[in-house]
Image (tube, rainbow, N blue to C red):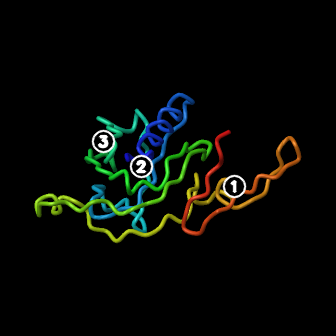
Amino acid sequence: MQSTKPYLIRALHEWCIDQGFTPYLSVVVDAMTRAPAEFIKNGEIVFNIGLDATNQLQLGNDEITFQGRFSGKVFPVVVPVARVAAIYARESNEGMAFEVTESVLPTSPADSATKLTTKPSMLSSVEREPAAKSSPASTPAAKSTEGGATDTLIATPNRPALTRIK
């Protein structure tokens, strides 16, 4: 059976665009991920995949491809859907986190020569600004709803905690 992950990524991307938000894609890099090495931090990279930031964006079932500008230079990006850790709106931190699984290794040596080989690590958190104070989207918290009930947001270690879309 086909995974729901690529469909959810496309839906949240469309939602971000419709709301006027900037969609960010958080990726845990592996040998199948093609991205500029100088922007990878601790085996992770976050891409702005908004319409103004990308060219030829393809949100496929197996991989996400686009051309992006990094320090003024165009770079073709390839991200296996299996390596996507989260998609979220930069402005509100609303989005969805996913389980990161291993992507299938290339069959030919020529394919693997073009891919980046950086040891992946788990995503620690998703925050708008590194210097920004902690927000409910990045820390576990209990919050009251209208009926007096409490929604507990549980942040799993090494996974981003994002705000629920209601």
Residue 42: percent from left, percent from top: 42, 69
- Determine the residue positioned at 53% across, 46% down: 88
Tag 1 residue: 135
Circle 3 Cα neighbour tier, 10 Å, few/some/many (<14 / 14–19 / ≥20): some
**Amino acid at dot 3:** Phe
Rendered image: mark on residue 66: 3
Q: Which x, y percent locates residue 34? A: 27, 55
Instruction: Report the residue that reaches farthest toward the front.
Output: 1
Question: As shown in the figure, which amino acid type bears the numbered disc 1?
Answer: Ser
Label 2 crowd (10 A; few <14 / some 14-19 / many >=20): some
Q: Secondary structure at mark 3?
A: strand
Left or right? Give the position of 82 relative to 97. Answer: left
Q: Which residue is mark 2?
A: 47
**Disc 2 on helix, strand or loop?**
strand
Determine the image quadrant of residue 58.
top left
Q: Nearer the viewer, residue 127 or 86?
A: 86
Which circle's residue, 1 or 2, is located before the other in the chain?
2
**In the rendering, at what x and y percent does residue 112 appear?**
18, 62
Left or right side of 133 for 31: left
Using a 10 Å C-alpha cutoff, classify the residue at mark 1 as few (fewer than 14 neighbours), some (14 to 19) or many (20 or more): some
Q: Which mark is residue 67?
A: none
- Could you give the CA–CA distance between mark 1 and mark 2, rounded to whole angstroms? 21 Å
Question: Could you tell which of marks 3 and 1 lies nearer the N-terminus?
Answer: 3
Give the number of marks: 3
The percent position of residue 110, horizontal first and vertical second, equals 11, 60
